Amino acid sequence: MQTILKEARPAIVLVVVFTLLLGLAYPLSMAAVARVVFPDKAGGSLIRNSEGEVIGSELIGQDFSDPKYFWGRPSAAGEGYDATASSGSNLGPTSQKLRDLAEERATALRQPHGLPDDAEVPAELVTASASGLDPHISPEAARFQAERVAAARGLSVDEVLGRIDEHTEGRMLGLVGDEKVNVVELNIALDEADR
């Protein structure tokens, strides 16, 4: 018995040391460095209004349904944009359920835009993202909604298109990904301009 404990002691000590080092000290030190170097990102990329109240996050979409707002991608996360239930629908391109759901959403999208029943709509506005939380749409999907938003806000279409251009984020390092518009930030900018 004494020999087993003597042989196991170094392994037990190493497990405790590495648990403290890699499971506690390293994560805490990285969190502290992140708070200093990237304070906004480390805190959840929170968006605050002019009074300093948290009204959203750059990373999580919100459910906008009022015609004066741009609408983001549908959410498959819980009851909609529920960060505690982040997930996609897991429906593939051959899924009849996905096709039916997309057509149902397209029909609902055509009506407020005054489009005929067979008009094409941007695919991203009728399909959920992989996380179900994506706050971004393409500039084309934002431009698709510009007339509705302009009419609801009493603005010219050119003013709304200008706002879209101001809030279009380019490719990362000019090479990776696509241009995108953060719907939450764009809607907040439009609200603040109305004040």
Image (tube, rainbow, N blue to C red):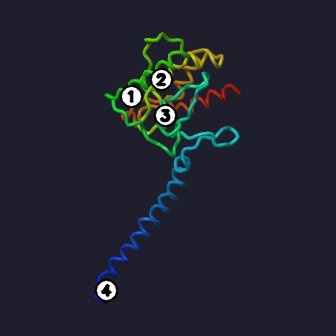
SS for dot 4: helix
Read off the residue under disc 2: 105
Q: Residues within 10 Å of mark 3 (few under 14, many from 20)?
A: many
Left or right of residue 158: residue 134? left
- Foreground mark, 3 or 1? 1
The answer to whether 127 is drawn above or below residue 30 in the figure is above
Read off the residue under disc 4: 6
First-in-chain label (4 vs 1)? 4
Read off the residue under disc 3: 75
Q: Nearer the viewer, residue 13 or 156?
A: 13
Q: Are marks 3 and 1 in contact (CB under 8 Å)?
A: no
- Marks 3 and 1, how far apart in space? 16 Å
Residue that sits furthest to the top in the current view: 116
Under mark 4, the amino acid is Lys
Q: Nearer the viewer, residue 44 or 4?
A: 4
Q: Mark number for residue 97?
A: 1
